[in-house]
Image (tube, rainbow, N blue to C red):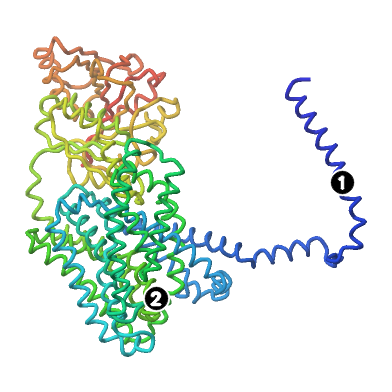
Amino acid sequence: MTRHQKNYFIYLLMLLLFGGLIYVAIHGGERFDSISAGHTPAEQNAWQMFCSTFSDSLSGGLVILLIQIVVVLFAVRVFSYLFRYIGQPGVIGEIVAGIVLGPSLLGYFFPDVFGWLFRPDSLTNLELISQLGLILFMFVIGMELDFGVIRKKINETLVISHAGILVPFFLGIIASYWVYEEYAASQTSFLPFALFIGISMSITAFPVLARIIQERNMTKSSVGILSIASAANDDVTAWCLLAVVIAIAKAGTMVSALFAIVLTAVYILIMFLLVRPFLRKVGEVYATGEVINKTFVSFIFLILVISATLTELIGIHALFGAFMAGVVMPPNIGFRKVMMEKVEDVALVFFLPLFFAYTGLHTEIGLIDTPQLWLICLLFIGVAVLGKFGGCAIAARLVGESWRDSLTIGTLMNTRGLMELVALNIGYEMGVLPPPVFVILVIMALVTSFMTTPMLSLIELIYKKNTKQDVVKRKLVLCFGRPESGRELLLVLGLLFGRRLKKYHLIAAHYTEGTDLNPIKAEQYERDSFKPLRREAALLKVKVEERYKVTDKVRDEIVHLGESEQADLMLIGSKSSYIDLSSGLLQRIKENSFQMVGTLFRERTNEIVEQIDAPLGIFVNRLDSGRPSRISFLLGGDLDDFLLPYIDTVLESGSMPVRLFLFQNGEYPVKRWMDEYQETLEVIEYEDLSQLSFDKDSLLVVGYEVSEEMVRNVADVNELPSLLIMKKAIK
């Protein structure tokens, strides 16, 4: 008997022995059933008893909550994907998903399902969990704020951000005159109502704005930096102002709210003058660490909870305390990155959808049931756009920005989204915002957020004619996935163009898939991704324009880049597990487990090759490191004439030996080549591809059509060297 067989035998014997003993013990205890006070004989069969138990569990609070979470998370993911597909931020789709699950749609068309799923007695649990999620989310928002960015453009941002608060705040108060008497007078006094209308017009959704800037590759542009800084300044000011508004709303009058305002000011001073310096010192310990121990994490969360509790007790909202706790966290990027990794995903993916669902339960579009209310809705939207967009755009123009940049800044600052919902829910819970006004303001938040992307595209279209004249220099574009792949692709361009490379405008693009990446992570990923490429650029003594973007449409972005830049050559990497080019060479390579280095494209490569009309190169690297020892060109006749200029350039540079494999029936300037470059050139004519052998440490340049022919003639593709598969421009 083997060891494993012995162990199974012992296990079986143990089960039989103790199973029998347990049965005897239970059977012996049945004599107590007759004297059990709580014993009632079963009047139902086993199936009926199971169904009864299942029904009781289904109606339980925990099961209902779990089902609510499943439904909400599924709906949010679906709508987020749909809205990203049409070019909108995913968070807008998540907000819409919450409204769809509310009485506006689910409750209207399926009232029974809605009544069971979101029955009134279950909403307390949903509310508490969503509030907890908001506290974590506001903590992350506070950590995302970079005061260094604000300080860089403090003069401009003060004017732009505060114009974007004061102008819409004033217009909002004026707009409340037309609403208050008829719709809010019976519920609240005018002062808190007008203040909440004003603050709802003034808020900018910093997280949504930051992600739009990332997606549109505006992070390094002056307008992007200025917009981020202005939004950050706006965020801090608006939340402080909201705290004051909440204090006034709870107290009833400005005078009675002074106590809460004074305590809030003291609280802010303590957080910045005592807590922040202390945390800065503590954070220095973890400046170089990749992990933070659980004790310190618990300490940070303790500060978060205490801060949120204090602000709630003072008379403002717990969310303000969570926001301030995030703001005073140690400024060290490494620390903030690690902390956000622990909190952000849970807050964004799990808790926030529950908040959207809870908001949707209060948002009943049917409450806007008169032409007058729809006119008020249009009025509020117009006031919000005029105040925020107009105020920020004019302010940006006054501080010296161009009209194009000013309009862009105004459009971005007009984004409200999630942050607006947070403020509106606070007003709704406090009884300051009546249900119809709440619904109108939610619609306003959605409309102003939804219009951001189309307006940015419209501004680009209007000013496109002015930028066309700037495109003069010839361009080379490379797209890469792995950081090292960027260096390899630039090396290939250096080999192809030699000294002429300096005459080209070089563009290197790297895309991170997804749209939920926070700015701090994105900055780090960008730095890490371009490091190897920068080193190679320094060796080649060339300048490379870096483009980084967070997007969930990588293929579309690459195709758009190829179309918009009209490059002389676009170069991408390739990897076996990522390639599917019908039944061609690359598919054959895949089947033979050919190890290729570097890219992010997967099966999308086929679609990219088909759609890009610029000259395209697909690089397949087999060298572990360093440069190839030789460049070889495989020409299959007249169809590869587009490769001849590359041969001339490589020969002219004289950087390394060149080998030409020439199909015998083709017409090539062989005599001229041999006369001028005899020392570095080797020419081999062939009739059949199967006769050829290649040096594994070389770079083989081959046309796309000829690569298809190689499939049938190369016995073992694993013996091929590094490949550069070239495809001429689509006419």
Residues 151 and 457: in front is: 151
- Label 1 secondary element: helix
Number of numbered discs overlaid on the protein picture: 2
Q: CA separation, marks 2 and 1? A: 60 Å
Residue pointed to by mark 2: 428
- Quadrant housing residue 83: bottom left
Q: Is residue 143 above or below residue 64?
A: above
- Label 2 secondary element: helix
- Quadrant housing residue 374: bottom left
- Quadrant housing residue 56: bottom right
Residue pointed to by mark 1: 23
Q: Position of residue 277 (x, y in %)?
A: 28, 49
Residues 670 and 572: in front is: 572
Q: Report the disc number at residue 509.
A: none
Q: Is residue 450 above or below residue 650?
A: below
The answer, for residue 172, to whether it is visible in the render is yes
Q: Earlier in the sequence, mark 2 or mark 1?
A: 1
Q: Amino acid at mark 1?
A: Tyr
Instruction: Tell me: 380 left or right of 135.
Output: left
The answer, for residue 556, to whether it is visible in the render is no
Q: Amino acid at mark 2?
A: Tyr
Asked if marks 2 and 1 touch (Cβ < 8 Å), the reply is no
**Residue extending farthest top:** 679
Q: Position of residue 464 (x, y in %)?
A: 13, 55
Q: Is residue 716 above or below residue 261?
A: above
Q: Position of residue 520 (x, y in %)?
A: 30, 46
- Quadrant containing the C terminus is top left
Q: Estimate how packed mark 1 is, as few (under 14), some (14 to 19) or many (20 or more) residues with alpha carbons within 10 Å.
A: few
Residues 289 and 8: in front is: 289
Q: Estimate how packed mark 2 is, as few (under 14), some (14 to 19) or many (20 or more) residues with alpha carbons within 10 Å.
A: some
Q: Position of residue 535 (x, y in %)?
A: 21, 28
